[in-house]
Image (tube, rainbow, N blue to C red):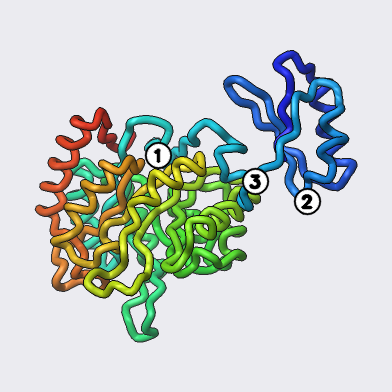
Amino acid sequence: MLILMHRQATREDVANVVAHVRERGYQPVELPGTDRLAIGVLGSNPSRIRDAVAALPGVVEAIPVSKPFKQVAREWHPEPTVVTVGGVRFGGGPAFVVAAGPCAVESREQMVQTAEAVAAAGASVLRGGAFKPRTSPYAFRGLGDEGLRILQEARERTGLPVVTEVLTPGDVERVAEVADMLQVGTRNAQNFSLLEAVGDTGKPILLKRGLSNTVEEWLLSAEYVLSRGNANVVLCERGIRTFETATRNTLDLSAVPLVQSLSHLPVVVDPSHATGHRHLVRSMARAGLAAGADGLIIEVHPHPDEALSDGPQSLTLQMFAELMEELRRLARALDREMVGAAH
């Protein structure tokens, strides 16, 4: 429920409403905006106190929030949220962010070479997995702590902030010591203990859509992070599992404008995991920009055919540089702006 306050409401009026909500066992959240002050009410069935709070001094109206996700919804927070990652801003305007790097950190040489190349091409954020969830227990699952140390060095050499995946609540603290942004991957999109743990860090979170999640389920996963007091969430559409087998997944580009209409959180697109084929990545990257996404996350590798994971969908360094030039031209045509890292 949202309690809308008069423009002329005093601090005493606001404090009285907040106290009233707390006394009845609900959690009040003040939501200052450019043209209103609202108080959100969290808890089970908050509409039961609607009539009581509507009669309090300074209250204009008490409005039920119709959607199951609350703090994620635009009803709750009408202005777009801007998430800052190492000086790079996601959302809230025409800026367009590209995160790039290999699926997995394989070696110092591979990671540093890739980091320097994507930085030179204009990427704003460096991606790379130190811990990898794999369908097969025999597949390469990352270098772990050594991978984190390599990512740290790559950041120091290039100035690019780092996003990397965290797999379990027990890993959150050590990954958060290195990463500028924590990624929750598709397999963990409904790992609610992990969502709460990353929410508690206060760090920016990249939340990928679960491979079979509806939009509502995806946004409810984000709600878990926001419920811990962390609104620094960037949503990532990475394709969903359908009957189609010609591509790795089915890229739901309609989810970009849909989610932007439902939520204030930034949305980016992962054309690499969505397609599974490098010859399709460039087209879908351009489509993501045209659809209004706030950014892209793209897999890049110096030698994709030798990659230990996701080689078929990884761009070569040259292909990525060419794609960035295409995206710059398209961004200008759409009155968008490609942004670089803040060094």
Disc 2/disc 3 C-alpha distance (Å):
11 Å
Residue 282 percent across, percent down from the top left: 17, 53
Disc 2 + disc 1, Cβ < 8 Å: no
Q: Residue 67, position in %: x, y?
A: 62, 49
Amino acid type, residue under disc 1 in the picture: Phe
32 with respect to 318 (left or right) = right
Q: Is 234 in front, or is 304?
A: 234
Nearer mark to the viewer, of 2 and 1: 2
Identified by mark 3, the residue type is Ser
Say few, some or many: other residues with alpha carbon within 10 Å of mark 2 (under 14 / 14 to 19 / 20 or more).
few
Q: Residue at the location (47% across, 40% down)?
A: 261
Q: Earlier in the sequence, mark 2 or mark 3?
A: 2
Q: Residues within 10 Å of mark 3 (few under 14, many from 20)?
A: few
User: How far, Cα to Cα, is label 3 from label 1?
Assistant: 27 Å
Nearer to me, 53 or 139 = 53
Residue 205: x and y, percent?
Answer: 48, 51
Which mark is first along the chain, 1 or 3? 3
Instruction: Say which element carries label 1.
Output: strand
Q: Residues within 10 Å of mark 1 (few under 14, many from 20)?
A: many
Task: Answer yes or no: is residue 268 visible.
Answer: yes
Q: Amino acid at mark 2?
A: Asn
- Disc ID at residue 290: none
Q: Are marks 3 and 1 in contact (CB under 8 Å)?
A: no
Report the quarter where the C terminus lies. top left
Q: Which mark is residue 90?
A: 1
Residue 331 coordinates in the image, percent (x, y) = 22, 35
What residue is shown with label 2? 45
| Rendered image: mark on residue 66 | 3
* SS label for mark 2: loop
